[in-house]
Amino acid sequence: MKMSPPFTVRQMKEAAESSPDTEIRALDEMTLHSTMTWFKKYNLVEVVRERQSKTEGSAYRILAPNLKRPASVSKRNSSFPLIDMVLDAVDALSPSTFGKQDTFEKTRELHPDFADRIKADSVSATLNKLAGPPYHRIRLVEKGAGGHGNTYEKISNQPQ
């Protein structure tokens, strides 16, 4: 998206909603906030006005031409690709239905170098993200209650 400086995440969300690209329209505000945090971390944007209130967020200015982040929010080239690690775990789980704890343990098993950084709540949030747009890689089968977590199921990508 081309944004004129300075711009806010809310303005980005409004621009995304009117995009002809369905993947861009599916971006939520949290994804946009995460992206701006990533851009800021790598000095690709600068904050020109700090957050004023709960409703008026920070304003940004682009510093780098051809601003691009790695594919989606998965941060494939980042130092901590949690979405990719959770997807590996989901693919490796043998039952078609699974929960947060199964995925958490499998993710830590498959990625021992990151085991100390992988947290159960982060895996749970990632599973919820993978169940919705734009991913739709898994489906929420049963909403958890009272100490029992959500149950998910793999979505078959095989042509019918």
Image (tube, rainbow, N blue to C red):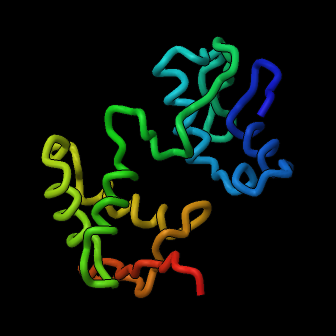
Q: Is residue 110 above or below residue 52?
A: below
Residue 135 at least partly seen: yes
Q: In which quarter of the image is residue 45?
A: top right
9 left or right of 37 in image: right
Q: Where is residue 132 in the image (x, y as percent from the top left)?
A: 55, 67
Q: Quadrant of residue 48?
A: top right
Q: In which quarter of the image is residue 71?
A: top right
Q: Position of residue 80 (x, y in %)?
A: 32, 38
Q: Position of residue 52 (x, y in %)?
A: 64, 27
Residue at 62% across, 28% down: 68
Q: In which quarter of the image is the N terminus?
A: top right
Residue at 41% across, 83% down: 143
Q: Nearer the viewer, residue 23 or 160?
A: 160
Residue at 28% across, 70% down: 100
Residue 145 at least partly seen: no
Figure label count: 0
Q: Is residue 94 above or below residue 66?
A: below
Residue at 19% across, 49% down: 111
118 left or right of 71 in image: left
Q: Nearer the viewer, residue 109 or 34?
A: 109
Q: Quadrant of the C terminus?
A: bottom right
Q: Residue furthest front?
A: 159
Q: Position of residue 122 (x, y in %)?
A: 32, 54
Q: Nearer the viewer, residue 17 or 54?
A: 17
Q: Is residue 109 above or below residue 82?
A: below
